[in-house]
């Protein structure tokens, strides 16, 4: 109670410094960590409500008790405050805010109009003004599938510029009629751009027009006895019909809209988002925002919307299953941010009502699946407790693994598992120092990773301490890890090592715990532990490959003064490899637009300096 009164006093002392008007306030704990972010139409009035209200929810009382400082940012209007609040919440993930977990950028289809033969590719991230983007798609798989089908219909290239500029003959995609092979001039620039325009028309919802056009072309070619060409067009029509069917293109679909519904059960909320673009259903995604059991549906939906669209361009229309507070404010904020008209509403006709009902059914199924997974996870965690005699059901597990090739590009990493499954935002990777460890020294790598990980926890208290760690390795790995943890003071931290055997595919793993060698006969538990180990292994390999790829993209060109990213890309696109650049003449380099006589001479002299010295 004393800390609650202290928190109220800190808030009271701050009110006198607050400007009248809209803004954002941040509550910080004793470690200067932001624990809550809020916005206000009038800062003093909103902050005063925390100390003048006769009743506060228990969660709010806990928040005030933990508040040791209060900071504020004044804004020009409430809409600006709303956008800033969403940005700060997503960036800092405050403990007492409603949080949109596992949010990510959705994939788009990109047409690189900046190239004379545009490439069809999948894209995430910040969009540029030169290219054309279609989306979002609900998943990477959905976008990838759409690209493959578009290849069949419009024969657009998917290869990157480097491969495109160095082809001497068509690749297999041309042979199986998935590409028109502009790389080797199998199609003219004019005809290729007709295919590009047709694909744009299709993605903009003009599928019937494209199908009619292709039918006429097939008929013309048949009359000319060009049966092979007519058959190719026929295959394209079939592919077009397939994508129309799978994407559920029909007159009842929404033109450009996001359909967003909410379903709640057992104090867990599922929010399902359906994406419609150009009357095409581009999939749906379920979200499970983190919130307190006392938060009402109105607050949850409101917080979700502004956080969801904080980094995603909204369509012209957003249709909701619930009417929530301050829709006009959200609308004004999004219109200001994205400079476009947006209509946010609830269902207003039979088609919209029916679509909302179907979407809610999907949300219910997704939530039921989530609850079943959580129940299974609780069961798995209790099995670990029973098998290894931990004395408690673990709630946070970290699983460690290393990856390297003969000591090169060594990476250590860990994945995290909790009651709700794998927590991917807590995954971490560590680049292993070359100087301290001999190549291929697994014990040395494990020692470095654990030392860095737990030394950081001990010094900063930034992360939650796991109650169980699992090591991918045998008795030696267990002993090394145990020694490190003991040296850092984590004597009571439980640890398990999983040792593979030659018959590991038959479930013959050996487990080490508290100096005991254990064989597990429970197949359910064995499968679960293998799944944890395999996820750690997958993430370690992924991190290693990313590092190795980054190493490969570095080249001798990086050592030439005046050769930046743009010129490096131009040279590699033209020649295809550093090796070919090394053997190129000055005249060959000068043929590239943007490479002057001086730059060409500098590159040539760099690669041929040994020859020049020997000639002298």
Image (cartoon, rainbow, N blue to C red):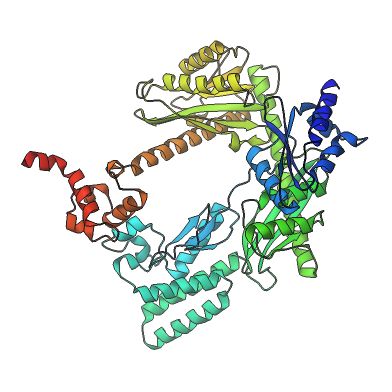
Q: Quadrant where the C terminus lies?
A: top left
Observer-nearest of 538 and 412? 412
Q: Residue at x 71, y 51 (%)?
A: 76
Left-right relation of 390 to 212? right
Q: Can residue 480 be seen? A: yes
Q: Quadrant where the N terminus lies?
A: top right
Tell me residue 118's x, y (percent): 41, 65
Left-right relation of 27 to 547? right
Residue furthest out toward the left: 616
Q: Can residue 59 be seen? A: no
Q: Residue at x 67, y 50 (%)?
A: 308
Q: Residue at x 35, y 21 (%)?
A: 438
Q: Residue at x 43, y 40 (%)?
A: 546
Left-right relation of 92 to 23? left
Tell me residue 205's x, y (percent): 59, 72
Observer-nearest of 357 and 434? 434
């Amino acid at each position: 109670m004393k800390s609650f009164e202290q928190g109220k006093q800190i808030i009271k002392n701050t009110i006198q410094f607050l400007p009248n008007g809209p803004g954002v306030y941040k509550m910080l704990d004793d470690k200067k960590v932001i624990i809550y972010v809020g916005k206000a139409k009038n800062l003093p009035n909103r902050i005063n409500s925390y100390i003048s209200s006769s009743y506060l929810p228990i969660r709010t009382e806990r928040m005030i008790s933990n508040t040791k400082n209060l900071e504020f940012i004044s804004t020009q209007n409430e809409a600006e405050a709303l956008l800033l609040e969403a940005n700060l919440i997503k960036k800092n993930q405050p403990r007492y805010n409603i949080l949109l977990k596992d949010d990510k950028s959705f994939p788009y289809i990109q047409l690189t109009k900046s190239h004379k033969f545009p490439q069809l590719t999948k894209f995430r991230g910040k969009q540029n003004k030169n290219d054309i983007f279609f989306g979002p798609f609900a998943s990477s798989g959905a976008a990838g599938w759409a690209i493959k089908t578009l290849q069949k219909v419009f024969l657009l290239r998917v290869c990157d510029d480097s491969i495109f500029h160095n082809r001497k003959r068509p690749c297999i995609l041309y042979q199986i009629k998935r590409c028109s092979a502009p790389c080797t001039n199998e199609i003219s620039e004019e005809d290729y751009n007709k295919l590009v325009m047709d694909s744009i028309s299709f993605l903009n919802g003009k599928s019937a027009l494209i199908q009619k056009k292709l039918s006429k072309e097939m008929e013309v070619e048949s009359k000319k006895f060009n049966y092979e060409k007519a058959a190719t067009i026929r295959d394209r029509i079939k592919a077009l019909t397939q994508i129309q069917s799978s994407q559920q293109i029909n007159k009842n679909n929404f033109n450009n809209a996001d359909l967003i519904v909410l379903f709640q059960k057992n104090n867990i909320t599922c929010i399902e988002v359906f994406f419609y673009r150009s009357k095409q259903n581009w999939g749906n995604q379920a979200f499970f925002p983190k919130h307190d059991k006392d938060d009402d549906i109105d607050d949850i939906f409101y917080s979700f919307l502004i956080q969801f669209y904080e980094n995603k361009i909204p369509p012209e229309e957003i249709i909701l299953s619930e009417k929530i507070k301050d829709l006009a404010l959200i609308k004004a904020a999004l219109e200001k941010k994205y400079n476009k008209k947006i209509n946010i509403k609830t269902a207003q006709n039979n088609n919209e009502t029916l679509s909302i009902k179907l979407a809610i059914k999907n949300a219910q199924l997704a939530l039921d699946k989530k609850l079943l997974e959580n129940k299974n996870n609780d069961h798995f965690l209790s099995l670990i407790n029973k098998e290894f005699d931990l004395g408690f059901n673990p709630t946070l597990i970290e699983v460690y693994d290393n990856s390297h090739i003969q000591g090169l590009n060594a990476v250590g990493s860990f994945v995290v598992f909790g009651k709700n499954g794998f927590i991917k935002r807590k995954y971490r990777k560590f680049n292993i120092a070359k100087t301290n460890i001999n190549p291929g020294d697994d014990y040395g790598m494990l020692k470095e990773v654990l030392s860095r990980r737990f030394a950081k926890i001990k010094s900063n208290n930034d992360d939650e301490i796991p109650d169980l760690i699992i090591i991918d390795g045998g008795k030696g790995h267990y002993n090394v890890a145990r020694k490190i943890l003991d040296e850092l003071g984590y004597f009571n931290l439980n640890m398990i090592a999983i040792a593979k055997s030659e018959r590991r595919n038959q479930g013959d793993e050996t487990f080490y715990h508290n100096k005991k060698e254990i064989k597990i006969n429970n197949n359910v538990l064995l499968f679960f532990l293998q799944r944890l180990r395999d996820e750690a292994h997958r993430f370690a390999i992924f991190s290693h490959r990313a590092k190795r790829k980054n190493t490969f993209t570095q080249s001798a060109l990086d050592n030439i003064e005046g050769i930046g990213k743009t010129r490096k890309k131009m040279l590699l696109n033209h020649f295809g490899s550093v090796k070919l650049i090394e053997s190129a003449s000055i005249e060959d380099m000068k043929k590239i637009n943007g490479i002057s006589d001086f730059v060409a001479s500098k590159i040539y002299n760099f690669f041929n300096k040994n020859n020049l010295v020997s000639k002298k």
